Structures are given as C-alpha cells and as structure tokens.
Image: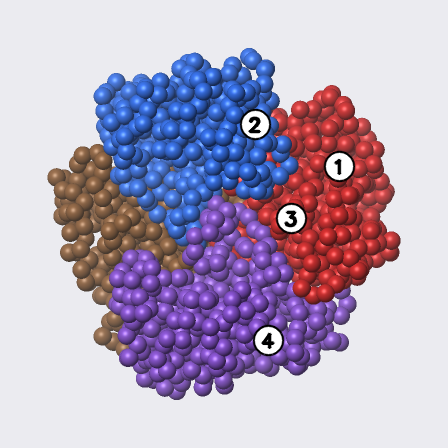
Chain colours: A purple, B red, C blue, D brown
Amino acid sequence: MSTSTINVGIIGASGYTGADAVRLLATHPHAEIKLLTGNAHAGKALADIYPQFAGLDVPPLVKAEDADWSAIDVAICGLPHSTAQDVIAQLPESVKVIDMSADFRLRKADTYAEWYGRTHDNPALLGQAVYGLTEHYADEIKNARLVACPGCYPTAALTALLPLVKAGLVSSDDLIIDAKSGVTGAGRSLKEQNLFSEVAEGMNAYGVASHRHAPEIEQEVAKAAGLDDARVNFTPHLVPMNRGEYVSIYARANGADAADMIAAWQAFYADKPFVRVVDNAPATRHVRGSNYCLLSAFDDRIDGRVILFATLDNLVKGSSGQAIQNMNLMFGFDETAGLQQQPLYP
Amino acid sequence: MSTSTINVGIIGASGYTGADAVRLLATHPHAEIKLLTGNAHAGKALADIYPQFAGLDVPPLVKAEDADWSAIDVAICGLPHSTAQDVIAQLPESVKVIDMSADFRLRKADTYAEWYGRTHDNPALLGQAVYGLTEHYADEIKNARLVACPGCYPTAALTALLPLVKAGLVSSDDLIIDAKSGVTGAGRSLKEQNLFSEVAEGMNAYGVASHRHAPEIEQEVAKAAGLDDARVNFTPHLVPMNRGEYVSIYARANGADAADMIAAWQAFYADKPFVRVVDNAPATRHVRGSNYCLLSAFDDRIDGRVILFATLDNLVKGSSGQAIQNMNLMFGFDETAGLQQQPLYP
Amino acid sequence: MSTSTINVGIIGASGYTGADAVRLLATHPHAEIKLLTGNAHAGKALADIYPQFAGLDVPPLVKAEDADWSAIDVAICGLPHSTAQDVIAQLPESVKVIDMSADFRLRKADTYAEWYGRTHDNPALLGQAVYGLTEHYADEIKNARLVACPGCYPTAALTALLPLVKAGLVSSDDLIIDAKSGVTGAGRSLKEQNLFSEVAEGMNAYGVASHRHAPEIEQEVAKAAGLDDARVNFTPHLVPMNRGEYVSIYARANGADAADMIAAWQAFYADKPFVRVVDNAPATRHVRGSNYCLLSAFDDRIDGRVILFATLDNLVKGSSGQAIQNMNLMFGFDETAGLQQQPLYP
Amino acid sequence: MSTSTINVGIIGASGYTGADAVRLLATHPHAEIKLLTGNAHAGKALADIYPQFAGLDVPPLVKAEDADWSAIDVAICGLPHSTAQDVIAQLPESVKVIDMSADFRLRKADTYAEWYGRTHDNPALLGQAVYGLTEHYADEIKNARLVACPGCYPTAALTALLPLVKAGLVSSDDLIIDAKSGVTGAGRSLKEQNLFSEVAEGMNAYGVASHRHAPEIEQEVAKAAGLDDARVNFTPHLVPMNRGEYVSIYARANGADAADMIAAWQAFYADKPFVRVVDNAPATRHVRGSNYCLLSAFDDRIDGRVILFATLDNLVKGSSGQAIQNMNLMFGFDETAGLQQQPLYP
C-alpha cells in the first residue's frame, strides 16, 4: 500500500458532488486539495458558497482555464455532462482524471449521441475511459488514466445485478428496476421541480422510459450477459429526502431463488469492503453519508421471480465516494482510505 | 338525489382515519356527526386528542359499548382489524356500516385466517359485506348494509388494474406492483419505526412478499380476470411524507400499448368524478387532502410491456374519503357531497 | 347576509397565494372565478401550471393587460410588490380590489420608499387603502374599495399583540417577535435558498433586523399604542415545512400576567370565528390549510414578562384566506363563507 | 500530546447519543470501543438495533450490572437522567466517567430535586462533577474523574452567552432565549409527539417556562455574572428535522453593540477549534454531523439591544461530540481527535 500524499484538483467544486468530494478528502490521509475550479464563482473562497467549509484550508476557486495543473496528480470532475468532456480534454496528460459526469460512461459514441442529443467531442478519449464501478472494474481502474464514474442509479442497480446476470441466475430480458432518489440527485440547479415546496410532502415518478441512466445500465447488463444489447425497465422516482437512493429490482430467476442470489453476492463481494448483504430490506438511512452499498434479496409471491434491493448514498457511493475509492486504487492506497466515516443516523 | 340529513357515528374516532372522516364530514351538506367512540379516550372531547377540531361542534368520545345507536343512520368504523369485526357485529341492524378496517375485505374466511392469523369471528357477516371500491361496485354498495372499504394500496392498484384486466389488456400473471406510502398509512400507533427520526430523510421497503394488502389485490384481480386465484408482486415502501400513496405497476400487455390502457380507463371512468387520467407521471401532492385518484400509462422500453401509475391520498380516497363516497351512494346523495375539497398544494 | 353570487378575477394566479385563492374559492358558495391573469403563462390552462386543478372549471390565464374586467366584481391580486401597484392602478373603478402584495400596507409613502427601495407610484391610492387585518378593521373593510391584506407574519404578530397593546397590558417598546415560517412564504420563485436540498433537514434565521414585515408591524403597534412610531424586534426563521407560521413573542407586562392577556383576547375575539385562544402552546399543524389563528399566553420565568404565541397557515389566514374573509365582508356574505375547511392533519 | 490507545465503554448504547458516540469513536485514532451496555437489548449485537453499524467490530451489548470494567479506561454514559446516577455510582474508581445525562449538571442537589422531582441519590458525587462545557472548563475537565456534559440547549446558549456575560457586555437579567431543536433531541423513546406524522410539516413550542435546561443555563449565567441566581427566558420549539439546534438570543447590551460581542467572542474562542464566529445568520445544516458551534451577532432594531445566534448539532457538540472532546482533554489527546468530520451538507 502506498502511503505517499497526492495533490488533488476538483473541477466544478461548486456542485453537490464537488462539495462532497471536498468533505471526504478533508480527512483523507493521503490526499490534499490543491486546486478548486468553479467558473461561475471564480475568485471566491469555497466557504462563500459552502459555509460549512469555513474552517477548512483549501485554495480559492479559479476558472478552469486559469488553473495550474503542473503540481496536480489527479482531477476529480464534478461538472455537468457536455461541459465535462471539453474541460477534461484540455488537461495535461500527467493528470489522472476521475470524471463524475456522464460524458465518458457510454462506450459507444452513437449511444451517447442518441441519449445526450449531441455528438461526443472526443470519441478517442471515450475509447480510453474505464467504467468506474469499482468492485467490477478494479483491475482496469488501477491502470487507467481516465475513469468514468457510473451514475448513482447505475451504481446501485449494477451492484445488485452484475454478479447475478454473469452467473445466469436472473434473466436479462425482463428486468424491472424501480428506483427512488433523494433530491440531491438533481444537483444544485435552479429548477422549479427542485424547490422545497414542490418536493416536500410528496413524491412522483419522472423520466419514465426515458431517463439517461437506462442506456448505462443496459450497456453493463448486456456485457455481463454476453449480449450485444439489452433492454431494461428503469423507472426513477423523486422522494422528499436530501440523500439516498433505493433500487427495487423485480427479476425472473432462472430456476434459482433468493438464497442463490444471496450466495452469489456473498461470494462475489466477500472481500469488497463497501458492499454488504443484509437480511432485511435495507434502508437509505443506514448508508447516509457513507460509501456503503447494501443488498438484499427475497423470493417473490409469483413463482420463479425474485425481488432485489440495493441502497446507497447517491452523493457518496453513487458519486464522490466511489470517485475517491477509484482514486485510492489508481494511486495504490488502501481502498478504504478517507472513506471510513460511519453512516450518519439519524 | 336525496337532500335529507343523516346522523353519523364514527367508531374509533381517535385514529387518523377516524379523524379524517371527521374533517370531511364537518362540511358535508347532508351528514351530522352525532356519535364518536374511542375506548382509550372515553369521556374526552375530540379536541383533547385532536386540537385542530376545537371549533367543531361534535359529541364527546364514549366507549363503544356505551354508545346509543338508536338515532344513528350509519356507522363509519376506523378501528384496527380484529377489533372491528366484534364491534360491528354488535351494532343494531338498523345501522348501516362502512368499515375501514381489513376485517370484511377478504371474501373467503380461509384467506382471512391465513393472512390475519386468526379465525374470523363472523363469517356470516363477511358473506354479506360488499367490497367498497366505489367505482367498481357502485350498484352493490347502494344496496348494502355493510361495506368493507378497500385498503389504501388496493384502492390505488385496483383502480389502475381492474378495467385493464377485465378488458384483457394486461396479463394477470405477471403484475409487479411497486408501492410507496406516506407514514399516516401506519396509523397513530407507537412503534419505533414510525418515529420521526426513524423515517425522515430516508426510505425503505417493508413487508416484502408478505404485506396483507397482497391477498386483497389478488382477490380482485382474479375476479376481474375470471380466475379462481391470482398471484401478484406487491412491494410496499415507506416514504418520508405524511400523506400520499403512489403505485407503479409494471405489466405485460397482451398486444396492447399504453394508448390502449388510457383509452380503456377513459371509457371506464368517463362519468366517475374522482378518477382522472393524466398525461404525465402523476404526483401525490396533486391529490393531497382530496378524494381524487390519478392514473397514467406509458410504454415500457421493454417491448410488449407497459408502466402504469396510480396516486391518491391514503387517508382520503384510500380510506375516509372513499368511505364517505360510499355513504353518499348508500343514502342516495350526490356522490361528491362533502368531497369537493381541492387538493392542498403545496 | 347576501346570498348573491359575485364574479372574481385573480391577478397573478400562478403564484402560491393565487393558487390557494383558487383552492378556497372553488368551494365558495357565492363566488365564481371568471378571470385569471398570469403574464408569464398567458394562454395556458391553470392546470398546466397547477395540475391539481385539472378537474376545475376555470378560464385560461390571460395577460393582465388583455383582461376584460367588465363583468368582474372583485380582483384578488397575488402579484409581487412593486408590480401590484401598477396593475391595480389600471383597474376600472367598478372593480373592488383585495391586494395580497405589500404595496398598499404601509400608510406612509416615505416608509414604503425606505423599505422597498423605490418611490410608490400611486400615493393617492395608497391613501385610500384599508389595512385588511379583518378582526381589527372590519368596519373599514366593509366599505373599502381597496383592501391591503397584511403580510403573513404581521397577521400572526398583530392578532396576538393589538388587543394587548390597546389595553395597555404589554409595553410597546420592548417587543421581541421571534417568528418561524414554512417555505411557501418565499413563494414559487427560483432562488437557491428555496431548493429542497438547501432547506430540508435544517433551519436558519434570515432578514435579521431588516425584514420588510417589521415596519408593517411597527405601524400597527404604534397606532394601537397611540404613538407616532414604534420599534420592535422582528426576527424571522425558515423552517423545513411547506405551510405554517409560528410567532413567539416575548413582552414586558405592565403589571399584568398571562391570565390577563388571555382574558383580553377572549373578550376581543369572542365573536370572531377564526381566532381561537388555546391552553397549550399551539402547533402549526392544527391550522394547516385552514383560516384559523391560534393564540396562547404564558407567564415567563422572568418576573413581569409574558410569552405569547400565535400560529396560522401563511397561505390561508396569512394570505388568501384572509383575502377571502375580507371579500366576504366587502360583499355582505357570511364571514366564514368558503372558509370552513377543517385543518388538514396530519 | 498522548498517542496511546484507551479502552472505552459506552453505557446505554441503544439511545441516539450512545449511537452517535459509537459513530464518532469508530474513527477515533486513540480509542477503542471495548464495552457496550444496553439493558433492554442485552445479548444483541449493536447492529441488531442500529443496522448501520453492521460492518463495525464492536462487542455485543451486555447488561450494565454484568459489565466487566477492569480493562476500561473511560465510560461514556448515554442513559436517561435518574437512571444514570445509580449506574455511575457503581463504577470502579479506576474508570473515568463522562455523563451525557442531566444527573450531574446542576451543582445544587436542591435545584436537582426541584426540577427532576426526586432527591439526588449521590450528592457527594454531584459535588465532584465538573460541568463539561469544554471551552469554558477545560482545566477542570483535564483533571476530572466525572464530567457532566451540558444539555444540548445549554451548550448552544452558554457558548454564546458566557463570554459576553463575563465581560459585562449583556445584562443577565433580561435574556430571552428562543430555542429550536430537531427531533433527535427527544431521543428514541416511544411518545406520540415524536411520531413522524405528529412532527413533519409542522412546528410548535413546548416546555414553555418549564424546560429542565432552564436551571442549567441559569446556573452558569449566574456564575458568569458573579450572582447567586439568575432567571432567563428559555423557550424551546420542536422543528421537523432530525438533527440541529438553533438558539436565538435577545439581550440588552450594556452600552455595547454587536461588533463588541463579535470581538469578545473572537478573543475568547481564538484558539478553540470548534467554535466559529460567522458573519451571516448561521444555519444548522452547516454543522450537521460535526462538532462545530457557530455564532453570530446583530444589532437589534430596538436601540440598545442585540440579537445573538448559536447553532450546533444536538447529537454532536450538543452531546456525544462534546463528550469525546472532553475525553480527549481527560486523556491528553489532541482536542480534535476523532472529531474532524466535516459537516454533512446537504
């Protein structure tokens, strides 16, 4: 294990994922925040936009184009998709990159164009990117220069599904993924539907049959199943809480049952510190603020079907925490470095 | 339409469903609350346990066994299951009964015994009960003495499903019902899992493959499909909000698509004032405090499958509101009498 | 009592106060909504911006300048301050006006200019406006053409204070008003501080010693005390709830105690249907969605001081409900017409 | 600074304060949890009652009377008042004790008896206890065997007030303390008023002029003012959030103003790592999950008065965090050891 110290730059530090990366890195034993970019807030102290960091010794925000990357080992990018790809393309080759946007998650530029409504600017870089689902791509991540961290929903869904699809325990052509998210999943942008009074004391589905995390899940499910393509149901819902993501998956089991699913998970995740199989239905509050992902499985009342649950904190294992977990692998640190906070409950 | 005035007694007025019946009846043009029972609070004013009713002219709570039913036309029962059946059995035949508990919903005493862990005390009365899903059993309800109001989840799920199953538009053997509820669904009972600090800022599934609303849904789905039995997936989740219920149903369409579902609903519910088909995914906040149920349908990404949504306020259309809607039918009032409150939004 | 029917126009129907006026008027026995303006949404149905009203028969939104006022008896104005005064100035004299903005609340144009950072466009109209605190200005309201409804905080604070200041029971020079509000008080505008993730699970003071409701409270306290001017502490706090306002007032009693305060309130509000004196500390949830204002008083631990509480729903008694209460007086209807909804609890 | 490792026992680990002590100690560099007591849950794993700790290596819960204290250096007690004093009295003298209950906070046994309705069982031990407001009693705490951690409200109020009262900047006879708390302040006990549906979407005052934290605040204010006794207004309110405490203090300044208050705080807390003076009104969300206490001061609109704010996380600086901060002093560790988590925001 390395115990050296690296210098980290955070691109787009003014969003919630950027801020949670700061929170986690603040107590990381081997990483120091040496650069923060935020174009709309350049010149400000981070504490001007996130007062909770008033006591933290970090540099002020600069514009991405003004940043000095010469002493930086790794960039963690919290920009929105479309913006991220261009900024990342400008980074010196000496800087490793961990992107939390959607820009490098889809392996096929065509699929990207179809779902994001624009041609990818940098298909070559896209070809080099490793999909940063840590527990499933650890070897590739260790050697990658550019890691594309999965979306929060795909992290939860794929952590549950991949070992089962690979083992042939569930059918890949009949996966129903009913997902629920807290509101930070929508970021800090000013949209009417994110106002407190439009969210509190209520819930609703959104992005029905059209959410951009669907092709990402399908890409990985198809790969695990050894197919060219897959189609899944993915139906997200907005729930009145800040953090937390909950995925309920309804699957046809190929002659297997919930006990088989649990056994497959326990085998696959035996030495993975952040994935835990639990007996009861998990709860988002049991992972709040932490990098854990909890799984559980039940037999359905309908014969031959199973119910799978996965939960995580969308800003941690679903975003900044997994980014740091990947960073740990990329630099030879202990996988759990800086990620040992226990869940905040209540 | 009748415009006479009836006298109503509420049994178990200290629970949330009892309280919401009081709220709605307070402005009902043809009903007066003349009796309130609540054994644990007998002798108290209703405002002692629900201070919001301090301005309302209603009688004090009495014990069920001390109640004088001679001038009462109808009893609305908000007791828990098991308790309800015995109290209802004691009522004089002259009193019509609208039960909001689970005691008279299942037509088969065997099914009741299996799911509620006890023999039904009154199978004869069970045989007379009409299932109070107003839009589907209006004729029976008009002539019934005992109406068993459906559970909140079944009301939402069946309002979406029954017209489609009857028309053969969806298969009844592959219904996935992912349901989400606010916390009032659990009543006012003192359980750790209902504490604010155990619910706020989080969510979880519960009662997986074992919730008592499953057999109720199955009973009605089977009937609509012309089958003896049906099995459905029914997976409830607890969401941090007071009121509101949201049901996301994933179904295999028999050669039909979402447009066919919508057409079938529009035809079936054309003259039903409380069921409305909407274009977008509905939201619980659009029905809060009101007796509406909103439906919408989408084609799934998986070929041949559809996604159906239903939402309602669990204490109104899911309980007390539907009870009063049934009362209106039973006494010849306009179906909407006392139920014209618009949703409280935000 | 009049039982005729009037035609109502709502100016600025797309805000929360406009929407709550629609909700309440929908079941008003003597009022019909015949005109809705909303410049940013002109041409849309109200249900396009407030889907909860999909079942309601109201006209589409038009621009204020395109509105036909010829058949309208009264305008209820939900526009923001500054905008309201100009639109109201254009209305034909035949239309009575109930303004929910701040534009006509301050009697002195100088005070308006000082606090709102602009000269009032219409000091003559300002001079005609009646302050719409219903219980205190009922006679003036009955004969007014233009009523300026108080802000939500002033309604709560003044309902508690005015009878006591008038009776000399509390000193007017040492009033500490610690106020707490739900988030709808900030309207539906897109500001970062109103995002769910910036509000939920937290609270803070805001507008300390600088909130625009202070001069409004001071104006009325001074008048009640028979003084030219008054200065009060008014410190608002934002609380993570949609609706509800809670005012805790700390006052020096002039030889009186809490029992005297209660007696003064009971005398003053004896025949006022919407103000209620309660024994315990009131709760916002006991007034949610209703037009009630609850008061209670306690002796302080510090000798010679008292603690006063007032609570109301900021969108109802604090805004649209009081507007309709005033409308009832202006047209000779029963004061409670359309306002008899019981609180929605939980 | 010591860098040795100590063994910690937590008494009453099943409450929220006990659980938060576990959360914080889990990453403490010099402390290991070697004993957990919880009489109602003896024999269970901690994860049975707090599933978020499933990955943590801690001993199972035992009954207090069965605990082996021979290898334990310090006990952190999370029991309720009354229970705590007897359990603490039984501990061997070799074990240092940090009590989070109210049992040893009041210096006078008479005051304890008056407010807690019972005679203190152990006035001798009471005499030895040091009041654990770290920033104000650090020297005594370093040498204490028994530290009585302040209540959450007193920690917030006194952190703001003590430097100002000592310096004579504010009068001690006219302090109005309007306090707001999240629901975890009430613990995990099953009371109707703590149910989600009784708390969410609403707020209320409670314990008006009678809350047990008043005498604790008065004791310390009197001491700081050099008086035998003091009387303060202390009015707590329950706010719908899990964590967080917010204290708004209205005080008469003795010829001083807000700038003087700020200067006095800055001088007093200059080298105190957990108290921070901020420019704007602070927010509970800026301290969530952390040990920080934020202060700010404003001039009132009423001449000669000031407004002071203090905020903290009631379970951290208001309870378990301050307990660990005290433990650090008692054992010669860095004061911030194990307490460097940044606030969880959102």
Q: What type is the residue that disc 3 sits on?
A: Asp
**Viewer-closest of B171 and B193:** B171
Q: Amino acid at mark 4?
A: Glu
Instruction: Report the quarter where the N terminus of chain A lies.
Output: bottom left
What residue sits 78% from the left and 27% below the top? B332
- As measured in the structure, the alpha-carbon distance from the residue carrying label 4 to the one carrying label 2 is 54 Å
- Say what amino acid the circle numbered 2 marks: Ile
Foreground pick, D288 / A229: A229
Residue appearing at x 33%, y 24% in the figure:
C122
Marked residue chain, label 4: A
Q: Quadrant of residue C301?
A: top left
Real-space Cα distance between discs 3 and 1?
A: 19 Å
In-front residue for pair A199/B13: A199
Secondary structure at badge 3 equals loop
* Number of residues whose C-alpha sits closer than 10 Å to that of mark 2, classed few (under 14), some (14–19) or many (20 or more): many
Task: Give the residue number, with chain letter if any, for mark 2.
Answer: C33
- From the viewer's side, name the closer residue of D84 and D45: D45
Instruction: Select label 3 or label 1 by which is in front.
Output: 3
Which residue is disc 4 drawn over? A220
Q: CA distance from mark 2 to mark 1?
A: 24 Å
Name the residue at 21% across, 56% down.
D136
Total numbered badges shown on the rendered structure:
4
**Which label belongs to residue B271?**
1
Pointer 2 and pointer 1: residues touching (CB < 8 Å)? no
**Is residue A302 visible to us here?**
yes
Q: Which residue is mark 3?
A: B279
Q: CA distance from mark 3 to mark 4?
A: 32 Å
Circles 3 and 1 on the same subunit: yes
Decide if residue B217 is on the left or right side of residue C216: right
Please identify the quarter of the rendering in which residue B222 is found.
Answer: bottom right
Three-letter amino acid code at the position of disc 1: Asp
Image side of residue B220 versus residue A265, left or right: right
